[in-house]
Amino acid sequence: MRNILDFEKNISDLQKKITKLRESGSDKSSLIEVNEQIEQIKFKIDKKLSEIYKKLTPWHKLQVARHSNRPHFLDYIKILIPDFEPLSGDRLFREDPAIICGVGTFKNKSVMIIGNEKGNDTESRIKHNFGMAKPEGYRKALRIMKLAEKFSLPLITLIDTPGAYPGVGAEQRGQSEAIAKCIEVSLSLRIPTLSVIIGEGGSGGAIAIGTTNKILMLEHAIYSVISPEGCASILWKNAKHAEEAATAMKITAQDLQKLKIIDEIIPEPIGGAHRNASQIIKNVGEAIKKSLNEIIDLDSQNLIDLRRRKYLMIANQSL
């Protein structure tokens, strides 16, 4: 049984019934009846999930965005860019597996890709540092941005990180400078750029690879300057106020679209992306294709001007 979130507890009993029916070892004569019962229960589950997910609070959406079964960068790349060729290293220090970069073909177009990878089990999560990049990860991303511009390739980024890694070593190696340089170069790239927030978009760690012409966001993803827990610890001196902070911070796709920070919301399957990976990957692919086609033929100066106007408008909103 997949991980059930706290606010989904009322469907847990229904899923247990399905498990029992499948394990009942029914003979062939009653198998059709069992399958019919399972389908009826599945219909009830979908109906309940649809009702629940229509009323999600920002705190609930944060839990969905962090769900361990949610598809990650490599899941998307495997389907959307099957000829993906990774490009590693920052040419200064070492490789950082928290950010994966490479080149490949998307819908018959050659593209450069950058994304955060969190991992999907204990071993891979440790390897990828839970998607929290270090300076060498951002300097690798910077190298790929410049490479994309050199070869006139559109740049696509998939964002899913709680934030940049805050360790002492990372700070000593210039974490803030690496992030700032990524943002600076992103604003001046003479190629079409597009980002998709597929899970968590945490702080400067997300903005470093998300300062693009188009920003798309999954329906239950989040995008924020700090985690709600971190915000609550600062403002209320107590992380127990994280749920209240999540609402105040306007972290959801719906809030951010109203604020004109993101351009499009990509719908998720009933019950979230973690319940139907193939469907959400298909949805993301279609959304990227549509948005990329809107900017692919713009000249370089127009792309730069549109990007700068976009972020100046966002900055002016906060004044």
Image: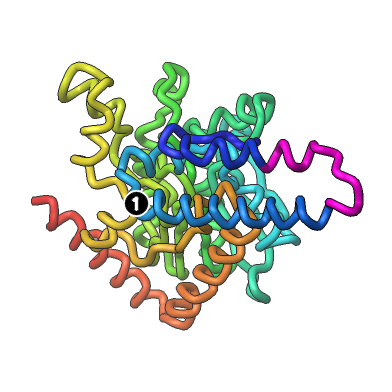
Question: The disc labelled 1 sits on which kind of residue?
Answer: Glu
What residue sits 85% from the left and 43% below the top? 26
Q: Nearer the viewer, residue 194 or 238?
A: 238
- Residue stretch in magenta: 18-30
Residue 253, x across and y down, in percent: 34, 55
Residue 126, x across and y down, in percent: 62, 24
Q: Nearer the viewer, residue 69 or 203?
A: 69
Q: Nearer the viewer, residue 22 or 53?
A: 22
Residue 92, x across and y down, in percent: 57, 34
Q: Is residue 243 above or below residue 113?
A: above
Residue named by callout 1: 184
Q: From the viewer's perspective, is 76 left or right of 65?
A: right
What residue sits 43% from the left and 42% below the top? 200
- The residue sitting at the left extreme is 319
Q: From the viewer's perspective, is 259 left or right of 9?
A: left
The quarter in which the N terminus is drawn is top right
Quarter where residue 39 is shown: bottom right
* Magenta region, main secondary structure: helix
Residue 298, x across and y down, in percent: 42, 81
